Amino acid sequence: MICDNGGSVVRAAENTPYGRLAAAADPMGVVFNLSSLQA
C-alpha cells in the first residue's frame, strides 16, 4: 500500500520483543516509523 501511493519501504517489518517495527518514506522522502505493539 505504501509503494502503491508513491512511498517506499526503508526497513521491512520485523518482529521484536515489543511488537512489529518497520520504517517507510512518503513520496517527498520523509521517513517515518510504523509499530504494532503487543498487548
Image (cartoon, helix red, strand yellow):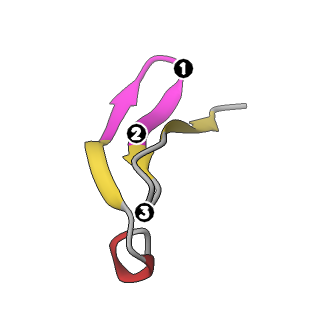
From the top left corner, tell me how far across and down residue 19 is, in percent: 52, 30
- Prevailing secondary structure class for the magenta stretch in the rendered image: strand
Q: CA distance from mark 3 to mark 1?
A: 28 Å
Residue at the location (41% across, 49% down)? 25
Q: Which residue bears the numbered disc 3?
A: 27
| SS of the residue under disc 1 | loop
| SS of the residue under disc 2 | strand
Circle number at residue 29 = none
Which of label 3 and label 1 is nearer to you? 3
Indicate whether 13 appears above or below 37.
Answer: below
Indicate whether 3 appears above or below 8.
Answer: below
From the top left corner, tell me how far across and down residue 7 is, in percent: 38, 64
Q: Is residue 16 magenta?
A: yes
Q: Which residue bears the numbered disc 2?
A: 22
Residue type, numbered disc 3? Pro
- Residues in magenta, as a range: 13-23
The disc, 3 or 1, on the residue closer to the chain's N-terminal end is 1
Indicate whether 17 appears above or below 28.
Answer: above
